[in-house]
Amino acid sequence: MNEERKVALVAGANGVIGKNLIEHLETLPGWRVIGLSRRGGPGQIAVDLLDADDTRAKLGGLDDVTHVFYAAYVDKPTWAELVAPNLAMLTNLVDAIEPAAPGLRHISLMQGYKVYGAHLGPFKTPAREDDAGHMPPEFNVDQQSFLERRQAGKTWTWSAIRPSVVGGTALGNPMNLALAIAVYASISKELGLPLRFPGKPGAYDSLLEMTDAGLLAKATVWATGSENEAYNIANGDLFRWSDLWPRIARYFDLEVAPPLPMSLDVVMADKEGLWTSIAAKYGLEVPYSAVSSSWGFADFVFGWDYDMFADGSKARRAGFHEYAETPAMFFRLFDEFRKAKVIP
């Protein structure tokens, strides 16, 4: 295989997953990377994947693409409303790239534990890649079904990567739990409050896992060597908020008070003025709009009053042996937010 002919097309380049994937690919010899995002950016193509014509116009000339990494996502109010646009974006991308790039070798699809019904309520844990499906709607399942049908008889292969909640540093992202915690802690400290766990009763003691974005990037590239397989990818350790939350509080020099269920999406709705004063006081360089996009997602995660973890042994048996320590991941991300003047 000619290493010089590996050309990666990364959809969702500005997200937590896509950003770290691009950074990892750029460290590897023999790869050239093209990022895709709606708003564009350095080294990226600005494209509206919901618009089939725009997608063909922007991507139809990319005849040297060998690998597609799909991590794009559009949010909607309900599970049912998520299906059509998220399936359309993947379909439009493949419709544009497949005929244009005769050397296409692999399409990587980013999924998650929603495949197992994890978002619906208590589910079988540890979840395994061959577990029975659940009642739709679920766009992750529809996207994989599309790739399975499309790949039949083709020379390219696909992989489906299933991380838990991903820890990374991308801003303005609707699913950045680490950033939501860091901003919540910073606001609590400014108000002279202890750090209270805001989730549902029972969520404080549930068994959970996370996926470091850097680890996920390595696994995603590794999985391009597989043929039509799905893999659970997580850090490799389990935790409970009841153990980790006091450690997070200590990082921010905060006391811990008993958990108090509250919606961060609601209680943080009026905090822009406070954040503006915090930013001025500590010389922060990021506006509230860039750090307040994940409150709803944090509420979702903190509402898991049931175990949330999967079996990652399939990937290990196939040869991927990387792991990460979850507490260390959080503290490293908090350090990076401070260094970038995102939080005090």
Image (cartoon, rainbow, N blue to C red):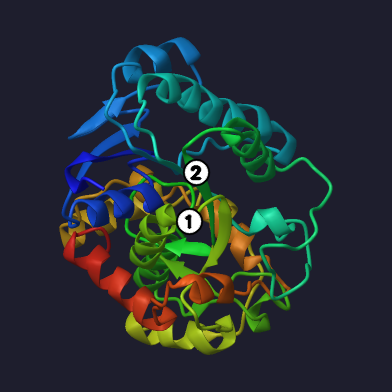
Secondary structure under tag 2 reads strand
Q: Earlier in the sequence, mark 2 or mark 1?
A: 2
Q: In the image, which disc is placed on residue 226?
A: 1
| For the residues bearing labels 2 and 1, Cβ distance under 8 angstroms | yes
**Above-or-below relation of 344 to 243:** above
Callout 2 amino acid: Thr
- Residue positioned 36% across, 56% down in the render: 221
Closer to the camera in the image, 12 or 242: 12
- Residue positioned 78% across, 62% down in the render: 121
Q: Which residue is mark 2?
A: 157
Q: Please state, as top left, top right, bottom left or bottom right, where the C terminus lies in the image.
A: bottom left
> Total marks drawn?
2
Measured as percent of width and height from the top left, residue 212 is found at 40, 68
- Cα distance in 3D space between marks 2 and 1: 8 Å
Callout 1 amino acid: Ser
Measured as percent of width and height from the top left, residue 291 is found at 37, 51
